[in-house]
Amino acid sequence: MSDDSRTAMPGFSGSVNIAMKIPRAQYDATVAFYRDVLDLPVTDVSDSAIATGVSRSHRCEFGPNTLWLDEVENYSRSDLWLQVDTDDIAAAMDRLAAAGVTPQDELEPLPDTARAHWITNPAGIVHLVGQKDL
């Protein structure tokens, strides 16, 4: 196969953002666990622009990652959301589509300027696939 006939493959890499969507009933205890039990740096960011559907949010420094603790009132159990970076969002979405993975942008609104899409893996874990700034 010549180089001319190959389609450029987008690169993927794990990103620094992990979001834990937490039901209201467990939210305060979960924040206290990371802040008081594990003694990790936790900051209340509820007054800043948080995602639609999120009531409160705390930012937790989780090693090299940021763990977002998001209170979601209509959840009955916690859910973990991950972020994956790509160097080419259009090629990445084409590659995912070829594998049967479709965008699920209805999960949580993204800004109109976002170069990103929500997807889920086969186990139902939500991933934000986003164009990393180069």
Image (cartoon, helix red, strand yellow):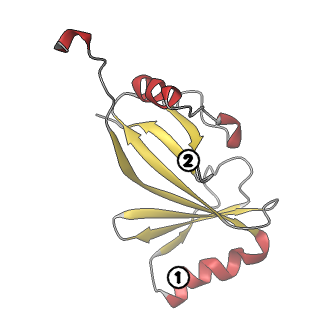
Q: Residue furthest front?
A: 1
Query: Which quadrant would residue 78 be assigned to in this image?
Result: bottom right
Q: Is residue 43 left or right of residue 27?
A: left
Percent across and percent down for residue 134 are 28, 34
Q: Which residue carries the number 2 mark?
A: 121
Binning the other alpha carbons within 10 Å of mark 1 as few (below 14), some (14 to 19) or many (20 upward) gives some
Q: Is residue 88 left or right of residue 108?
A: left
User: What residue do we see at 58% from left, 39% from top?
Assistant: 118
Q: Which residue carries the number 1 mark?
A: 35
Is 63 drawn above or below residue 116 in the view shown?
Answer: below
Q: Is residue 28 left or right of residue 123?
A: right
Query: Which quadrant would residue 111 be assigned to in this image?
Result: top right
The disc at residue 109 is: none
Eye-nearest disc, 2 or 1 = 2
**Residue 55 versus residue 67: which sits nearer the camera?**
67
Quarter of the figure that contains the N terminus = top left
Is 79 drawn above or below residue 28 in the view shown?
Answer: above
Percent across and percent down for residue 34 are 53, 80
Percent across and percent down for residue 56 are 69, 63
Q: Which type of secondary structure does the marked residue at label 2 adopt?
A: loop
**Residue 14 versus residue 35: which sits nearer the camera?**
14
Which amino acid type corresponds to the residue marked 1 in the rendered image?
Arg
Q: What's the CA distance linking mark 2 and mark 1? A: 30 Å
Q: Is residue 110 left or right of residue 73?
A: left
Query: Which quadrant would residue 44 be assigned to in this image?
Result: bottom right
